[in-house]
Image (tube, coloured by chain):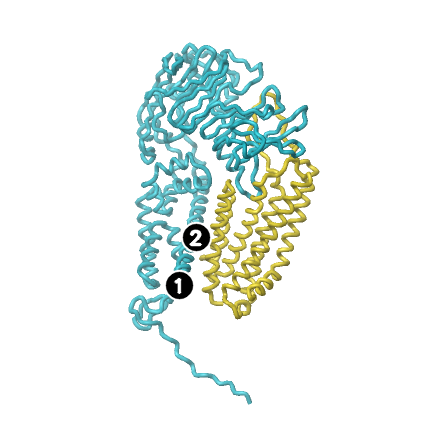
Amino acid sequence: MRFFALLKKELRECLPWMATAAAILLLFGSLKLIDSKQRQIGYQYRVFERYSEVGGYELLTRPISDFSIFVFMSAVGLGLALGVRQFWADDFMGTWGFSVHRSTHRTTILAAKICAGLISIVAIGLVWCYLFWRANSSGYFVFPLPERCFIGGWLICGMGLLFYLGATLVGLSKTRWYTTKLMGLGFALWMFITLTQQWTLWWGFGTLVIGTIVLLFLICEAFLNREF
Amino acid sequence: MAKKRNSEYIARLSGAAITLVLLMFVVLIVQIILVQLAWVYTVKKQPLSALPDSPEWRMQKADKLFLPDGTIYLANKVDTQHNDSYAKEEITDVNGLVLWQGIHKDRPSKYLDWASFTQNFNEQQMRDISQLSPGLPGFIEAPVRVSGEFKEVWRYDLEAQAFAGYEAGGRFIGYLGANGFVASKAQAKPFGEFKGFTSWTDEDPSSIVMLWQAKHRIYQIDFLARNVETLFENTQSDIKSVRWHHWRPTYPKDSSDIRYRPLIDCLTSDNNHHLIMREPNQVITMELPEQLQEPNQIFWQWRYNSDFTATDKAIFVQYRDTNFNPPKSQKLMGLYQWEYNSKPQPQSIGLYKVIDDGKLELVNQFDWTKPVVQASQALNPEYKFPKWITNVSPTVFNLLWALYGDSLDKFRTEGTGMMQGYVTIIMGFRPLHSSLNYVLSVMMMAFALWHGWARRTSWDKLILWLIIVGAFNLAGLLTYLALNHTPVIKCPACGKKRGLEMDNCSQCGSPLPIPQRKPTDLIMTN
C-alpha cells in the first residue's frame, strides 16, 4: 500500500514533464506525418537512365527518419528532466530528509521513484505507437512501414530510459564533478552510442537491457548506502 | 547480509570498470586531438617526398598492357593533375617508343582489360544503414515502374533475408527469396548472409537488376520479371571476392575492338576461382598453380595479384609477381617491408591462356626490377609522430598485441561493427615505444603505492589497484585517483599519515580517537 501511495505521489510530480514531452511529440510527429502525406513519400524514387549502374545509396530510403528524431528528443529530454526532478531537486532544496525518512524501507521509496520514471517513458512509447499506427493506417505512406521501424522506435524510447537512469545516478553521487560524479551520464552516453551502432534488433535490445541493469545496480547501491 | 555484501562488491566492481573504460576514452580523445594538432602544425609543412622520375621508376609505375596475342605495352601517366579517367597518358612499347598519347578514358580498346570488383554496396554499408540510430534504420528498396508510374516496390527484409514486395497502393504482393517469387514470408527461402550487391538498369529502365552476393551464393534478381537466378552456389567454402567483366549490359555504341564474354570471377576461401561466363553459358572452376597463388595474405594491398578476362577467342589470366612473400605474422610485417624496400626486387607480369580443363598456358611474360625505396620515401611522416603520444596508452594493449596480434589484425581488416572500431583503437594506439611505456607504468605504480600506502584498507585491494595502474597506464592511474582519493590525517597514536576509510590505523592498528563528549546543555524554560 505504501508503495502505491509513493508511486502516486511520484507520478503526480512527473506528470507535468511527461505530459509536456508527450504533447511535443504528438504535435511535431503529427505535423511531420501531414508533411509526409503532402509530399507523398514513397513515390520519390529516382528515375534511372538506361544502361546505368545504380549505386546502393540510390536505393536507400529512410521512411520515418523525419519524425522518429522527435521520439528520440522527447524520450531523452524527458529522461534527463525526470532524473533531475526526482533526484537532483531534493539536493538543491535540501529536502532529502523529508523524502527519505518515511515509515517504509528505502527500497520501496527508490522503487516508487524508478517505476514512476519508467511509466513516464512508456507514455512516450505509447505516443509513438499512436503515430506509427496513424502512419500505417491512414495512407500517409504509400508502402506500409515495416515492423523493424516500430520496434526501433521502442528502442529509441529505451534510450530515454538510459539517460533517465544516468541522470539519476549523477544526482545520487556524492563525489565531486571532476572525479566520478558524471560517470552515470558518461555510461549512459556510451550505452547510447553502442545501441545506435547495433543493426540487429536483438543486439539493440540486449545492449539496452545490459545498460539498464548495470545502472540500476549502481543506483540501488548509491541510494541504499547514501547518508541523506 | 552476505547477499548485501555481494551486491555491494558487484556494484563497486562495475562502477570501477565503467570509470576505467570512460577514462580510457578520455585519454584516447586527448591523444587523438594531440595527433591531429601535430599533424596540422608539423607534418603538413614537410613536403611529402615523391618517388623519383627515373626510367626504373617509370617502368615500375607503368600499367602493363597486353594484346590478346601476348604483346606487351607500357602506359605511363604524363600529368598528375587529373584523376585516373582524365589523366593524360602515353603508351609505349617496351623499348620506350611512344605509340599513343591521349586521355586515359580514350585509351584504345585493343588492349585486354580485366574483371574488377563488383560491389557498390557492401556488408558494412548495409549494417551502417540498418543501425538503430535516432533517425531509425534505412532500407534498400528497388522500385518498379510501368509507363513512367511506380507500380511496385521491393524492400529488403533484413530478418527474413529476402525482398518483400508491395503494390503502389500498399497491398502486399509476396516475397522474392532464394527460391524465387513466393506468396508469403514463411515460404521465402533466405538468400543467406548478405555480403554485397551491385545493381543496374538495362535497355528497359523501368526496373533494376541486382547481382546479389551472399556468403555462399551469387544471385541475379530481376524485379520486373520477379525472377531470381542462382548464378553460383558453394556451401563448402565462403565467397572471398567477386569480380566481374562486361556482365552488366552496356549501350550498343560501347563496342570494343575485342569481343568480351560476360564474366564473373568468384574466388572462394578454398582458393578456387570459379569463372561464370555467358555467350555461351559456361562455368570453369580452377585452382591456380601454387606459384601463381597470392602469398600469405595479410595486407590487402598484397592481395589479388591475378586478374581474369574472357573473350570470344580465349580466357586469359594475368599474374603479377612482386616477389613479396609476407611473413606468417603481422607483427613482423614492418621489418619485412623495410627489408623488401631496401633491396632491388625482381618483378614480373605474365599472360596465361586458360585451357578448357582449367590448366594454364603461358603466352608471354615481362620482367623488370623494382628499384630500392629510400627510407625517406618509404616512411610516411604521419606515422613518425604518434609514437611518443602512445607512451601513455594502456600497457595491456601491447600484451594483447603480443598474444593475439594476428587475430586482431585479421579482425580489424575483415571485421565489422563496433568491435572492429575497438580493435582498431587497440592497434592504432598501442604503445609503440614499449620500454618507455613500461617505465611510465612502473612510475605510476610507484606513485599509486606511495599514495595508497596510508589510505589502504586491505592489502588485496591495494595490490589489485597497483595491477590496474600498471596494466592501464595513465587511464589506470586516473581511475585509481578518482576512486581512492580520500583525506588523510596524522594518527594520534603513531604520528604517521592514515586514511579515514578504516577504523584502525593501517600503520599501528590503533582505532580512530573517539571525540570527547561535551557536557549536556540544558535549556531551561522559565
Residue count near mark 2 (Cα–Cα under 10 Å), binned few <14, some 14–19, many ≥20: many
Q: Residue A46, image x and y in percent?
A: 63, 29
If the image is split into quadrants, where does the N terminus of chain B sit? bottom left
Quick one: SS at disc 2?
A: helix
Residue B54 visible to an observer of this rendering:
no
- Decide: is B366 above or below B495: above
Residue A49 shown left or right of residue B380 in the figure: right
Labels 1, 2: front one: 2
Determine the colour of chain A. Answer: yellow
Residue B413 shown left or right of residue A124 in the figure: left
The three-letter amino acid code for the residue at tag 1 is Thr
Along the viewing direction, whichever of A69 and A139 lies nearer the viewer: A139
Q: Which chain is cyan?
A: B
- CA separation in Å, label 1 and label 2: 20 Å
The three-letter amino acid code for the residue at tag 2 is Ile
Q: Residue B134, image x and y in percent?
A: 56, 44
Tag 1 subunit: B
Please tell me the numbered disc located at residue B18: 2
- Decide: is B94 above or below A178: above
Where residue B93 sits, quadrant-wise, is top left
- Decide: is B271 above or below B396: above
Residue count near mark 1 (Cα–Cα under 10 Å), binned few <14, some 14–19, many ≥20: few
Tag 2 subunit: B
If the image is split into quadrants, where does the C terminus of chain B sit? bottom right
Q: Residue A24, image x and y in percent?
A: 65, 51
Whether tag 1 and tag 2 are in contact, CB under 8 A, the answer is: no
Please tell me the numbered disc located at residue B486: 1
Along the viewing direction, whichever of B196 and B233 lies nearer the viewer: B233
Quick one: SS at disc 1?
A: loop
Along the viewing direction, whichever of A25 and B364 lies nearer the viewer: A25
Q: Residue B46, image x and y in percent?
A: 42, 35
